[in-house]
Image (cartoon, grey):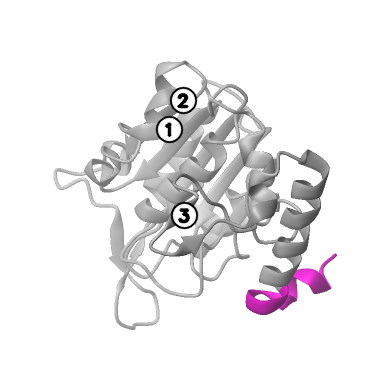
Amino acid sequence: MRIDIITVLPELLQSPFQHSIMKRAVDKGLLEVNCINLRDYADGPHQQVDDYQFGGGAGMVMMVEPIFACINHLKSQRTYDEVIYLTPDGPRYDQKTANFLSMQQNLILLCGHYKGVDERVREHLITREISIGDYVLSGGELAAAVLVDSIGRLLPGVLNDETSALFDSFQDNLLAPPVYTRPASFNGWEVPEILLSGHTAKIEDWRHEKALEKTQKRRPDLLDEN
C-alpha cells in the first residue's frame, strides 16, 4: 500500500512512521508513506499556499491552485483509490472505515491548515472527508498519522499475530474484553480463574460476555448499531 500525505509541515510527520509497528510495515515493504510538501507546488518566491477569505473574516484559507497542481501531479503517476481530506467537520472516523481503507492500494491524504481549504478543493478534488473527533487541531498532520497507523496495522504481514487485529475494540461493534498477563496473583489481585483453565471454548464465552458488559457500560450506542 502507498499513502501520499500532502502537508505544509512535512517535518511533523517524520517520527510517527519511524518506530514500532509502522516502521515494521515500512521495512517489510508492506507500506510506503510519502510526505509531500505542498509549497513545492506553489508559485512565487515565498511559495504561498494560503490567502485571505473572500468576504472578509478571521483566518487564512489554503489556496486551490497549489493543491490542484499537487494532486494532478500525483495522479499523473498512478491511480488513487481515495483522495481524503482531514477535517473536523467530516464524517467521524471508525474501525469500519479503517478496514475499508486498508484494502485499497493508493491513498492521498490532504492535511488542512488555517481556516481550511478553498471549498472548490472539497467539491472537485476530494473523494472522502474524515474527522478523527469533534475537536479542532492546528493542522491535519496528527490526524493523518492516526489514519496511517490505524490502516497500516491491518495490512497482512504487519502484525506478528495476524489474528490480533480481528479482536480489537470496534471490530464487531464491541469493546475489547479485559486482558491479563503474568503474574496470576499480585498484591492480592487475582486473574480470573477461567483464563487459567485452558478451556478454550469457555474462555471465548467469558471474553464475549465481558465484551458485552463493557460495551453496555461504556458505549451502549455501539450495541444499537448491531
Label 2 belongs to which residue?
Answer: 25
- Disc on the earlier residue, 2 or 3: 2
Q: Say if 15 sits above or below 50 in the image.
A: above
Left or right of residue 109: residue 11: left
Label 3 belongs to which residue?
Answer: 185
- Disc on the earlier residue, 1 or 3: 1
Q: Say if 84 sits above or below 1 in the image.
A: below
Crowd around label 3: few <14 · some 14–19 · many ≥20 (10 Å)? few
Left or right of residue 36: residue 157: right
Q: What residue appears at the point 52 percent right and 60 percent down from the top-left corner?
A: 190
Q: Is the Cβ of the residue at disc 1 closer than 8 Å to that at disc 3?
A: no
| Residue sticking out furthest to the right | 226
Q: What x and y, as percent, mark residue 99?
A: 68, 43
Label 1 belongs to which residue?
Answer: 21
Give the CA distance from mark 1 to mark 3.
31 Å
Asked where in the image residue 197 lies, by quadrant, the reply is top right
Which quadrant holds the N terminus? top right
* Main SS class of the magenta portion in the image: helix
Residue 196 is labelled as: none
Judging depth in this view, the residue of 52 and 7 nearest the camera is 7
| Residue sticking out furthest to the left | 45
Q: What residue appears at the point 29 percent right and 64 percent down from the top-left corner?
A: 51
Q: State yes or no: residue 139 in magenta.
A: no
Judging depth in this view, the residue of 175 and 110 nearest the camera is 175
Give the CA distance from mark 2 to mark 3.
36 Å
Kind of residue indicated by mark 2: Ala
Crowd around label 1: few <14 · some 14–19 · many ≥20 (10 Å)? some
Q: Secondary structure at mark 3?
A: strand
Q: What x and y, as percent, mark residue 30?
A: 52, 20
